[in-house]
Amino acid sequence: MEHLLSAFQVAFQPASLLAIIVSTLFGVIVGIIPGLTATMAVALLTGLTFGLPAEIAVISLIGVYVGAISGGSQAAILLNIPGTPSSAATALDGFALSKQGKAGLAIFLATTSSMIGTIISAVFVFMLTPFLGRLGLHFHSYEYFLLALFGILICGNLAGGDSLKGWIAGLLGLVISMVGLDTISAFPRFSFGMANLRAGLFLVPLMIALFGVPEILKMFNKQEEKTGEMSSYKIKEGLSILRKNPGAWLRGGIIGSLIGIVPGVGEDVGGWLSYWSAKSGSKNPEEFGKGSYAGVIASESGSNACKGGAFIPTLSLAVPGSTSAAVILAAFFMHGYRPGPLLAIENPSFIYQVAIFLVLTSVAMVFIVVLLSRFTVKILQFKKQTLMPVIFVFCVLGAFLVRYNVFDIRAMFVFGIVGFLLVYAKFPAAPLLLGMVLGDMAESNLIRGLRLSDGSVTPFFTRPISLFFVIIIALLIMSQFTWFKKGLAKIKGAIFKRRA
């Protein structure tokens, strides 16, 4: 209790509260702009916090981290262009709601779900950091590969009923992720002698291409000239929807927290897995992708819960759970903190501070986004002929600012055309993006695992966590076949008859 009270005293100082508001606002603005990631925002702010007191610096970094991940949902909902990779899953239903004139309601649901997911993850940080930090250590190359494979296979459930197209798109994303140097032996693949391709294709320009460029090209279609009329909403309406979908935000919060614990996976995977879980457990899965409230709630609570989950290995083991957490870990050391097994002994109140900072910044983020959304939703009132050229400029800037390389702009154009052709052929872009996200993780851990076992695949099936993933993957594949669905329906019918 002494450490908890000390953490509250630090958090509720006037300077701390001001830092929360300013840093969260900055993070939200960065998140809204397509191409500017949470990692970029945190890295930018890290240098500026060098001369600040340690507590103010930490709360500022957490504020911009929380704000950026949550702010990305606005661009996803309003323009179908995810502001950050973690908000890509939100675009599936958020943009559909926007076209129905419910953009304000969708933003409120996404933001509130972000807060709920962050608070759930803060509870994990607060209560279970030592135990769950050790759990993350049990994930080795075999488990990482199977986790990545599982993520790619759920593409079948993200394809709007056509599992084959989802798997094809996911595998295509996996192939695209292999462009460049092999992460283990540095062998060039698909580079064709070009130095830029040897460095690999970066995720942010491709994400902008797949989601942004097709929307810009649609501007030339006369049927796409008008946007839906905006309908007002009441906060009570949004809260009522949240009360009706407790499973979506609760499952999302738990899944996201657990995914965040696994180092190197990231918020985007947490959002996709939470979305898949909500769709699989829904009584009306056909509504997903067409404006489902549960889809927005699940994806946002899942991706934002990863933030707190990522802090668990960062604090307890000094192993960052995500790229943004890696930058924050460096900032912790810069300001005199020493994350690791001895943190609970040397500075126990710091763990409580991080948990409380997560909660306070997420609450501040809700108020900031609700106020900003009154202005951002007016974007939909502009004619697309006026709006899309401005969006195009932001897309180009977002692609260029990743590594200040003109080649990324060219890659954005090429893959933008690919994305437009995918839309024309009715292939979903989301699985392609997910395949690119997980490709490097799948390939490097498969090679590393085979080298550790001298080429034997036995550890992939004999280790307890690996065996669990193998069973889940097998069930996931079989669930897409008609004969399995019919058999499962017969079993359910037999059980209900016995109960009756």
Image (spheres, rainbow, N blue to C red):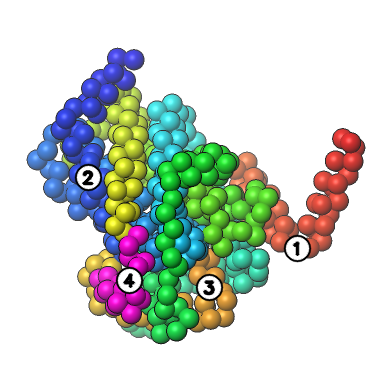
Label 2 secondary element: helix
Residue at the image position 66 percent from the left and 66 percent from the top: 161
Amino acid type of disc 3?
Answer: Leu
Q: Nearer the viewer, mark 1 or mark 2?
A: 2
Disc 3 marks which residue? Answer: 172
Residue closer to the observer: 234 or 480: 234
| Residue 450 shows in this picture | no
**CA–CA distance in space, label 3 to label 2:** 38 Å
Q: Would you call the spot at circle 1 few (<14 residues within 10 Å), some (14-19), or many (20 or more)?
A: few
Disc 2 marks which residue? Answer: 23
Residue closer to the observer: 306 or 452: 306
Disc 4 marks which residue? Answer: 382
**CA–CA distance in space, label 1 to label 2:** 49 Å
Q: Which of marks 1 and 4 is in front?
A: 4
Of the residues under marks 1 and 4, which one precedes in the sequence?
4
Amino acid type of disc 2?
Answer: Ser
Segment tinted magenta in the rendering: 377-397
In-image side of 35 versus 458 (left or right): left
Amino acid type of disc 4?
Answer: Phe
Q: Do the residues labelled 3 and 1 touch (CB within 8 Å)?
A: no
